[in-house]
Image (cartoon, rainbow, N blue to C red):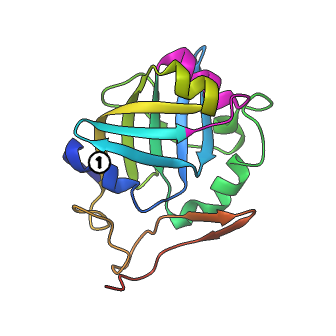
Amino acid sequence: MRKEIPINIAYRLINHGPLVLVTSLFKGRIGVTPIAWLMPISDEPPIVALEIWEGHFIYKAILDTGDFVINIPSSEMADLVRKLGSVSGRKINKVKEYDLKMEPARKIKSPRVKDAIGIIECKARKDKRLADKYNIILGDCVYAEAEKGVFSDRWHPERHGPKTIHHLGGKIFCVPDSKII
């Protein structure tokens, strides 16, 4: 069960660089894809940036809907994440194909991944220059929540429980397992 967290620290859900599942809608159809290139760019107001190739189905979905959800999967979802990243949402309905459980968002239209350990709901911010030149989509964070016991005001890799997934390149992934300092 997740708990609501203050929106002004929502960036800490992704500041440590996890791979995420981005969800949005395109003409009523759910798009979901793994994204490794994202970052917080402001905490006041809370804004995130995603780099998504313009040919991806999710890119078109975000532009169509005007919002998206950053879903932070746990390491238990690693096989699903790999599958979601291996095929285009243009070719198959990933939600049905992989029996992905979705839930309604709190403040936007796009749905959320029910089993995610962290959620950031975002309204797309229009920045034509960044989108056209770099395929960067900005998002105003409007709601966030994270799994109890795994995130308080930061992630807790030293605790037993779900871990975030990190993309190291190619088909190599890892999880954090301890706090070192």
Question: 162 above or below 48?
Answer: below
Question: 75 above or below 131?
Answer: below
Q: Position of residue 108 (x, y in %)?
A: 37, 24
Residue at numbered disc 1: 10
Q: Indicate the amino acid at tag 1.
A: Ala
Task: Give the residues drawn in magenta, as a range.
Answer: 51-66
The quadrant the C terminus occupies is bottom left
Q: Position of residue 172 (x, y in %)?
A: 70, 69
Camera-nearest residue between 10 and 129:
129
Specify whether 153 is left or right of 131. left
Question: 14 above or below 163?
Answer: above
Camera-nearest residue between 81 and 155:
155
Specify whether 68 is left or right of 28. left
For image coordinates 54% across by 66% down, the residue present is 75
Q: Position of residue 82 (x, y in %)?
A: 70, 56
Whether residue 53 appears in magenta in the rendering, the answer is yes
Whether residue 14 appears in magenta in the rendering, the answer is no
For image coordinates 50% across by 55% down, the residue present is 73
Camera-nearest residue between 178 and 42:
42
Report the residue that reaches farthest toward the bottom: 180
